[in-house]
Amino acid sequence: MTTILKLLGTRLLTGAVILTLVSIVIFASVELAPGDPATRILGKEAPEEQIAVWRKTFGLDRPLTERYFQWLGGMVTGDLGPMMRRSLQPIGEVLPGRIINSLWLAGAAMLIYVPMTLAISILSAIFRYRYPDHVMSVTTLFILSLPVFVVGPAILVLFVLVLDLLPAVQFIEQAESPIDRLKILVLPASALAIGMSGHAIRMLRDNLIEVLDSDYVQMAHFKGLPLHRVVLIHALPNAIMPFLNVTALNLSFVLGGSLIIELVFSYPGLGMLLFHAIGLSDAPLIEITVLITASLFIAANTLSDIVAILVVPRLRTG
């Protein structure tokens, strides 16, 4: 517990520094981009009076540093301001739903990805250099060769057109229960899980083979311990660290919004929101979405380290 508390304290401090630097970089990059956002949003034919009012609404008539600290203060207080659209819809009305959708997608993808990766890696390591291992190695290489923009449509075609198991269009807003949500998430979550699993399977398989061939695991074999105990208790905890690191990066990627998957399946997550914000040159929405993505990335990596401490006993000391 002490080790976890130290880790949380360190990560909170470093996370605050990283997020501050990210906020400065993203704010300066967006606000100093060429062109006038008022003209881009309202059009070149908009009256000067309307442009002046619009610029005042978003504080564009004030110095950059003043705007930055006001924006940062809004982040702390929860006052995110309006989007740069004619409707001036508050960002706070749009963002929570997109974050929840991304969390649902990430959770569903991890529920498929983790057991699938562990099962295939363990079986491949147990049957190393034999027929099952060869089949799984070829399969993972095939997965690694496929970009995510191919995996998504392929799954869509297979389950919708060929097998006719799921409808072509599904909207998560129409889900009336968690079970309905999971049904809607099956296709995009499966596409993400398959896309993430190739590298993780090969890495964990190689580490497991190395650990299974080590002296202390061989000693456990000689003592007559069942194979499942040898693998799950002695081998897996000592081979799992790289897998946890890769999983943390994959989780960060999913939480931040897998744009291609969200576009293919018309899924309203953070990636889709950022895509539309960039297309509309919506500076406040771009800034907050990127900052939230960075926060989720830090949180995912912290969670990975906590899991590693709980799983690997030698990390609990020191």
Image (spheres, rainbow, N blue to C red):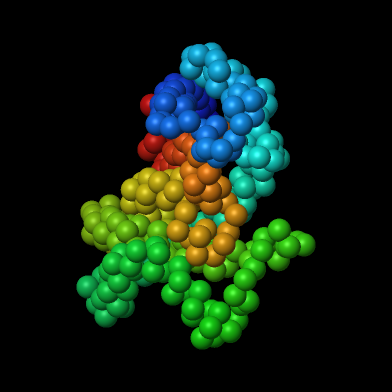
Residue 55: name its quadrant.
Answer: top right
Residue 119: name its quadrant.
Answer: bottom left
Residue 125: name its quadrant.
Answer: bottom left
Question: Can see residue 285?
Answer: no
Residue 81 shown left or right of residue 220 in the figure: right
Relative to 97, residue 10 above or below: above
**Residue 195 location, x and y as percent?**
40, 62
Question: Can see residue 79?
Answer: yes
What is the count of numbered marks?
A: 0
**Residue 78 location, x and y as percent?**
67, 27
Residue at (53% x, 48% y) in the render: 276
Choose between 186 and 218: the one closer to the eye: 186
Choose between 131 and 2: the one closer to the eye: 131
Relative to 210, residue 290 above or below: above
Relative to 107, residue 264 above or below: below
Residue at (55% x, 32% y) in the render: 38
**Residue 7 location, x and y as percent?**
46, 28
Residue 127 shown left or right of residue 237 in the figure: left
Residue at (33% x, 67% y) in the render: 146
Choose between 312 and 299: the one closer to the eye: 299
Residue at (48% x, 43% y) in the render: 278
| Quadrant containing the C terminus in the rendered view | top left
Choose between 248 and 75: the one closer to the eye: 75
**Residue 22 location, x and y as percent?**
43, 28
Relative to 103, residue 130 above or below: below
